[in-house]
Amino acid sequence: MARYCDSYVTVSIESSSIPGSYVAAMAALNTIIVAYIHRAPKRSLAALQQTEQQYTSGAPWFQEPDPAARVPAINQGGTG
């Protein structure tokens, strides 16, 4: 991705614990997001409103399973 960017930020993820290894990366990403929002607040708010409308209009990637299409469970109990 850095090949196509004008500039980039590298963040070390070396740590003895998995959650601790991503704290610096997530903090850097959050800082960049906040800086971008402050740079173009109207545009960011418009994009956020569009995203909110998509989320509240229903789940586009998930549909409730049809109860009539349920496959009956197989009894795996013993003979007895």
Image: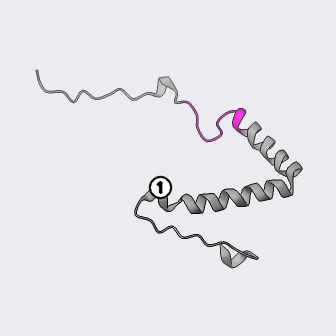
Assign a secondary structure to mark 1.
helix
Q: Which residues are magenta?
A: 55-64
Q: Nearer the viewer, residue 59 or 19?
A: 19
| Amino acid type for the residue under numbered disc 1 | Pro
Q: Residue at x 14, y 27 (%)?
A: 78
* Residue 15 quadrant: bottom left
Residue 56 within the segment the image draws in magenta: yes
Q: Residue at x 11, y 24 (%)?
A: 79
* Residue 30 quadrant: bottom right
User: Quarter holding the C terminus?
Assistant: top left
Q: Residue at x 62, y 58 (%)?
A: 27
In percent of width and height, residue 65 lies at 52, 30
Give left or right: position of 42 versus 26: right
Q: How many marks?
A: 1
Instruction: Please say if 80 is above or below 76.
Output: above
Give left or right: position of 47 versus 55: right
